[in-house]
Image (cartoon, rainbow, N blue to C red):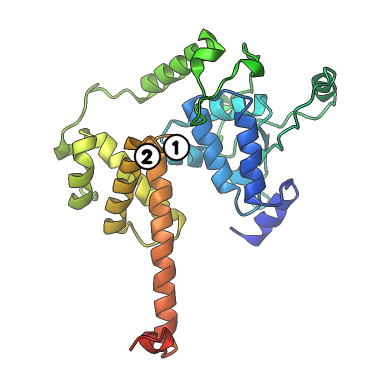
Amino acid sequence: MHPVYIEQMKAYQTFKSAKDVRAAIEAHLSRHILTENQLRVLRVLEFRSRTVPGVAMVKYSTIAEVVGVVRRTVIRAVNKLVALGIVEKYGRTREARGGDGANVFVIVPAQVPTDDPQADTQSEESGEPVPSDSEADISGPEEVEEVEEVKDSYKDKDIRYNVSGARSLQSVGKTVQERVQDEKEEDNKEKDTPLGEKLPKEFIPADVPESFVSTAWPFNRDAVKVANLYDRCKLAARSLGDNGVREELAVEAFRVSLFAMKSRKLRGDLAGYLYGTYRKLAEEEMAAEARRAYFEDNGIDLGAFFGVA
């Protein structure tokens, strides 16, 4: 990221480290029930806020591509996070060409629990400005979606956790379940294809290598799903500035991600986990390549350097 942008983001910084950001997010999650999409969007913002702890500069469209949902779903998820006080959003203007730039998302520090009944009232009467809902890549007023005022129909004390930390929707009543179902139904409507059915293997794009297809197909017998999974690897490669997807790493990343899902260690969806897994593997391999290139360029014998005969 350009140093100028980093300096601009530091103006919003409230955390000292990524560890503090994670602790704040977990504290928020202990008090609020989030749908799957809302949680995935929050995790993307957390990941993108590592450079400046707690501050992410990113577009809705970028988040949608990473999470694997439509842009409108991301807007709804962000609006909910803002309404719950988990995230603050600030519009940003491009200085060179004018217009809206990428939004700045700020993770809000978690409030310390208090028994003072006036605490919530004081917070509501603090008069803090509500962040603008202008969007970075909006091209017309018809695409602007205002933040709706959301009133939760459940209380924090109704939220229960099991030993593994997974929240139970049954404990917070039917309203939350209905919200989750409505969101899924709306997403499905927006994603419906004319065929309305799974596509056979022959429809998988030619740029998806056979090794990846043969590994992923038995578990996702739909050309669209397999292609979308490989797209996550391409997106991760682009985010690293790599020339392309490393085929062996893509296959390995899928295996690791699938194992995590089957082991119930995956929080979120397979595509999002695959993105992070591939990115981590590629980062490690690129770092190793850079070290080897350095030794070769400087005429250093690797065996002698590491004391290997």
Q: Residue furthest front?
A: 163
Can you say which quadrant of the picture contains the C terminus?
A: bottom left
Picture residue at 59% right of the left edge, 27% below the top: 144
Question: Front-most of 303 and 284?
Answer: 303
Disc marking residue 271? 2
Callout 1 touching callout 2 (CB < 8 Å): yes
Q: Is residue 100 above or below residue 179?
A: below
Nearer-N-terminus badge (1/2): 1
Residue 104 visible within the image: no
Which amino acid, mark 2?
Ala
Where in the figure is residue 163, as x and y percent of width and height? 50, 29
**Element marked by disc 1:** helix
Can you say which quadrant of the picture contains the N terminus?
A: bottom right
Q: Is residue 230 above or below residue 108?
A: below
Question: Front-most of 245 and 109?
Answer: 109
Q: Is residue 143 above or below residue 254?
A: above
Picture residue at 52% right of the left edge, 41% below the top: 44
